[in-house]
C-alpha cells in the first residue's frame, strides 16, 4: 500500500472517530437537558367552579398576556380533556392563601368580586417598609387609649385584701401577682417571708413606694425590722422548747432591685438560752456573697452574674455606671443608701476567684485550646497599644488575684528582657518594610510618658483562643514576642505582622543565647493580610499564603481578639494595677469559654465546607469512582 493510500485511510478513520464522538456528546447533552427539565417540574394552581369546570381568569397586568384566542375559548362541562387550560401563579403567600381559601369555599367568583370592594381592612404587605409603616400606624392609633389606661391605673380605688378577703387593702405589692392588694396584717405576714418584694402604700390617695422596714399600722407608717431571707435551722440545741426568732446585726443587701437595709436573723432557745446567728456558710448557701468576712454588706450572686454578662455584651461598661443603675432602682422603690464601687468590685473579683478555683478542681484549663492541644499548627502574636494605663490612676499596693494566670508576671518579663539586651547589642530605631510598614522598635529605654503599662502583647491560636499575654512597658520591642514564643513552643508556625524583621532578630539572639535555639524549629509565618503592605519580595518569601502545610491559616486571629479587648480599655486605663490585671484575665477567661462553647459547631462547619470543596473538585474532573473519604 502506497503512502498516499495509507494517509487517506488514516484520515477516513479519524474523521469517523470524531463524528462518533460528536454524536456521543450530543446524546449526553440531550440526556442531561432532559433530566434537568424533569427534575424541576412546574407547579401551577388552577381555579375551578363548584361543578369542577375550569375558570378562565383575567391575567394580572404585570404578567405576560395570553393570546386572544385562548381567552375567548371558555371551557364547557362536556369539553374534551385536551382543551387549553388557563392557570395562575400567586405572587405572595398572602395572595396564595386568599386564593386557596376562595377555591375551597362554596362562593362563586362573581360573589367574590361583589364582596371584595366592601373589604376595608388592610392586607399584610410583603414589603418590609410597608409593614413597618403599618406597625407604626397601629401603635399611633392605639397610643391615646394606652395613655388613658396607664392614667387610670394610677388612681387608688378602695379594694379588699386579696389574701384574707375581709379587711381593706392598704398595700399593693408589685411581686405578689396575681393578688397584689393586701391588708396590714396580711402584708406583715406575707413579707416576713419575702422581704425583698417591692411594695406600695395606698393610704395617701396615691401609690407611695415602701421600703421593707416600713409597715402600715392604724393608717400610719411605722418602723418594722425585716430579716434577710436566709436558711434557718430547725433546731440549735437538744431542748424541746420552741425557738424565738429575733433581728440581729443590721446589714445592707444588694440585689438587682438595688439596696435593702435588713437584719441578720438570730435564734434564741427559751429554755437554755442558746443562741444561733447566721454565719458565712449559711450566707453562701442562700445565694448571697459577703462583701467582707464580717458581712456588713451582702450581694446577691445574681448581681455578679448580671454584671459579668453585661460586661461581655458591652465591654466598655464601667462598674460605676452599673452601680448608678442599681442606685436609681433603689430610689425608685422608696429605699435609700448608696453602693460602694470599691466594695462591689473587690467582692466581684473574689467571687470570680472562687469560681476559677472550682474550675481548677474540675481539671479545666481556661487558656488551652482543646482543638490545638497537644500540638498547635499556628500561634499568632501581636501587640495592642490601646491597653495602656495612666500613672495617675489608683496606686494600690494590693496584689492581683489572678496574678500570673493570663498576664505574665512583670518581674519575670523584665528580667528576661534585661537578659536578652545584655547578651545582644541593639540599635535604637525603626525597621521599615515596604516604605510604609513600621516594624517594632528595639530599645532598652522605658517610656517617660504619663503611662505606666503601655499595652498588651497577646498570643492566640488559630481558633481565636487566648493562650497568654504580657504587659508592655517599652513599646512593641522584639523581646516581648520572644518571651511569648518560648511559652508556646509546641506550635508549627509562628505568625506575626513583621515576621520579616523578627526572624533575623531571633536568629541573632539564638546564637548568643543557646537556650533559645529550639525556637528556630518553628516556621516563620507573615500574616496574610499584613503581607499585602510589605514589599513584594517580602510577601513571596514570608507570607503564610505560600507556606507548605499552613492550609487556609491567615495568621490574623489575634486581630479578632484585639477588637474585643480594645473595648475594655475604656475602663481599665483608669483602674489600679491589680484591678486591671484581674479584669483583663476575667474577660479573657470568659472569651475563651465562649469560644469553647461554639468550637464544635465551628469545626463541623469547616469540615463540611472542606468536604464540599473536595467533592466539587472531584466532580469537575469526573473522578466519580474515587471515594472522597479515601
Image (cartoon, rainbow, N blue to C red):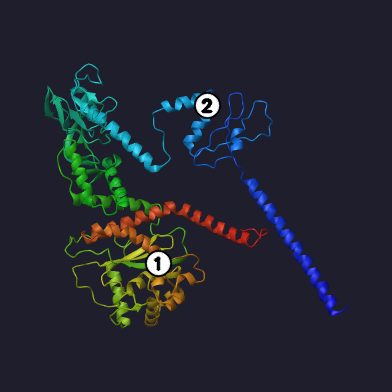
Work out whether 560 lies above or below 245.
below
Q: Is residue 244 visible?
A: yes
Secondary structure of the residue carrying tag 2 is helix
Q: Earlier in the sequence, mark 2 or mark 1?
A: 2
Q: Which quarter of the image is occupied by the N terminus?
A: bottom right
| Residue 482 horizontal side relative to residue 232, left or right | right
Name the image quarter holding residue 146: top left
Number of numbered discs visible in the structure rendering = 2
Work out whether 58 lies above or below 608.
above
Residue at 28% x, 80% y: name it. Answer: 429
| Residue 491 horizontal side relative to residue 346, left or right | right
| Residue 211 horizontal side relative to residue 102, left or right | left
Q: Observer-nearest residue: 36 or 325?
A: 36
What residue would you read off at disc 1? 380
Secondary structure of the residue carrying tag 1 is strand
Asked whether disc 2 touches disc 1, contact meaning CB atoms under 8 Å apart, the reply is no
Name the image quarter holding residue 148: top left
Work out whether 215 lies above or below 230.
above
Comparing marks 2 and 1, which lies closer to the viewer? 2
Say the numbered circle drawn on residue 109. Answer: 2
Q: Looking at the picture, how far across and down is residue 14, in whole percent?
A: 78, 69
User: What's the distance in space between the residues labelled 2 and 1, CA to CA?
Assistant: 70 Å
Q: Is residue 259 visible?
A: no
Q: Observer-nearest residue: 246 or 93?
A: 93
Amino acid at each position: 500500500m502506497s503512502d498516499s493510500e495509507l494517509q487517506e485511510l488514516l484520515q477516513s478513520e479519524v474523521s469517523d472517530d470524531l463524528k462518533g464522538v460528536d454524536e456521543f456528546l450530543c446524546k449526553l447533552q440531550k440526556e442531561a437537558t432532559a433530566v434537568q427539565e424533569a427534575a424541576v417540574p412546574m407547579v401551577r394552581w388552577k381555579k375551578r367552579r363548584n361543578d369542577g369546570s375550569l375558570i378562565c381568569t383575567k391575567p394580572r397586568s404585570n404578567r405576560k398576556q395570553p393570546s386572544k384566542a385562548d381567552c375567548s375559548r371558555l371551557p364547557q362541562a362536556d369539553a374534551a380533556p385536551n382543551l387549553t387550560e388557563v392557570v395562575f401563579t400567586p405572587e405572595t403567600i398572602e395572595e396564595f392563601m386568599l386564593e386557596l381559601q376562595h377555591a375551597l369555599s362554596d362562593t362563586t367568583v362573581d360573589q367574590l368580586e361583589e364582596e371584595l370592594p366592601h373589604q376595608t381592612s388592610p392586607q399584610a404587605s410583603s414589603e418590609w417598609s410597608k409593614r413597618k409603616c403599618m406597625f407604626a400606624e397601629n401603635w399611633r392609633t392605639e397610643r391615646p387609649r394606652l395613655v388613658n389606661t396607664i392614667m387610670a391605673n394610677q388612681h387608688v380605688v378602695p379594694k379588699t385584701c386579696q389574701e384574707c378577703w375581709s379587711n381593706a387593702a392598704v398595700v399593693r405589692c408589685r411581686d405578689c401577682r396575681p393578688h397584689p392588694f393586701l391588708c396590714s396584717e396580711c402584708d406583715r405576714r406575707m413579707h416576713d417571708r419575702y422581704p425583698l418584694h417591692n411594695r406600695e402604700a395606698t393610704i395617701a390617695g396615691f401609690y407611695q413606694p415602701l421600703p421593707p422596714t416600713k409597715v402600715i399600722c392604724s393608717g400610719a407608717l411605722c418602723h418594722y425590722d425585716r430579716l434577710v431571707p436566709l436558711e434557718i435551722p430547725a433546731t440549735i440545741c437538744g431542748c424541746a422548747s420552741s425557738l424565738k426568732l429575733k433581728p440581729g446585726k443590721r446589714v445592707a443587701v444588694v440585689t438587682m432591685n438595688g439596696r435593702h437595709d435588713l437584719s441578720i436573723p438570730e435564734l434564741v432557745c427559751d429554755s437554755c438560752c442558746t443562741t444561733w446567728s447566721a454565719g458565712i456558710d449559711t450566707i453562701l448557701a442562700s445565694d448571697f456573697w459577703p462583701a467582707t468576712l464580717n458581712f456588713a454588706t451582702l450581694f446577691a450572686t445574681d448581681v455578679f452574674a448580671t454584671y459579668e454578662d453585661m460586661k461581655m455584651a458591652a465591654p466598655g461598661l464601667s462598674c460605676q455606671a452599673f452601680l448608678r443603675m442599681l442606685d436609681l432602682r433603689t430610689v425608685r422603690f422608696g429605699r435609700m443608701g448608696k453602693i460602694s464601687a470599691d466594695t462591689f468590685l473587690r467582692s466581684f473579683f473574689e467571687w470570680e476567684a472562687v469560681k476559677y478555683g472550682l474550675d481548677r478542681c474540675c481539671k479545666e484549663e481556661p487558656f488551652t485550646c482543646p482543638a490545638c492541644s497537644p500540638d498547635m499548627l499556628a500561634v499568632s502574636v501581636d501587640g495592642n497599644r490601646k491597653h495602656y494605663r495612666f500613672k495617675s490612676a489608683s496606686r494600690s499596693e494590693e496584689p492581683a488575684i489572678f496574678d500570673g494566670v493570663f498576664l505574665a508576671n512583670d518581674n519575670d518579663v523584665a528580667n528576661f528582657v534585661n537578659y536578652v539586651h545584655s547578651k545582644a547589642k541593639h540599635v535604637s530605631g525603626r525597621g521599615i518594610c515596604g516604605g510604609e510598614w513600621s516594624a517594632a522598635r528595639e530599645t532598652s529605654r522605658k517610656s517617660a510618658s504619663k503611662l505606666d503599662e503601655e499595652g498588651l502583647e497577646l498570643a492566640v491560636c488559630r481558633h481565636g483562643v487566648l493562650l497568654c499575654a504580657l504587659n508592655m512597658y517599652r513599646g512593641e520591642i522584639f523581646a516581648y514576642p520572644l518571651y511569648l514564643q518560648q511559652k508556646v513552643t509546641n506550635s508549627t508556625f509562628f505568625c506575626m505582622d513583621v515576621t520579616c524583621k523578627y526572624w533575623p532578630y531571633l536568629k541573632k539572639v539564638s546564637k548568643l543565647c543557646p537556650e533559645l535555639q529550639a525556637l528556630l524549629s518553628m516556621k516563620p509565618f507573615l500574616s496574610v493580610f499584613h503581607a499585602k503592605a510589605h514589599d513584594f519580595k517580602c510577601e513571596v518569601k514570608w507570607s503564610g499564603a505560600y507556606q507548605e502545610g499552613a492550609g487556609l491559616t491567615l495568621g490574623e486571629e489575634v486581630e479578632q481578639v484585639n477588637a474585643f479587648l480594645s473595648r475594655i480599655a475604656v475602663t481599665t486605663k483608669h483602674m489600679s494595677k491589680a484591678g486591671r490585671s484581674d479584669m483583663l484575665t476575667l474577660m479573657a477567661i470568659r472569651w475563651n469559654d465562649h469560644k469553647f462553647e461554639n468550637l464544635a459547631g465551628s469545626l463541623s462547619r469547616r469540615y463540611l465546607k472542606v468536604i464540599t470543596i473536595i467533592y466539587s473538585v472531584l466532580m469537575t474532573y469526573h473522578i466519580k469512582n474515587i471515594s472522597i473519604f479515601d
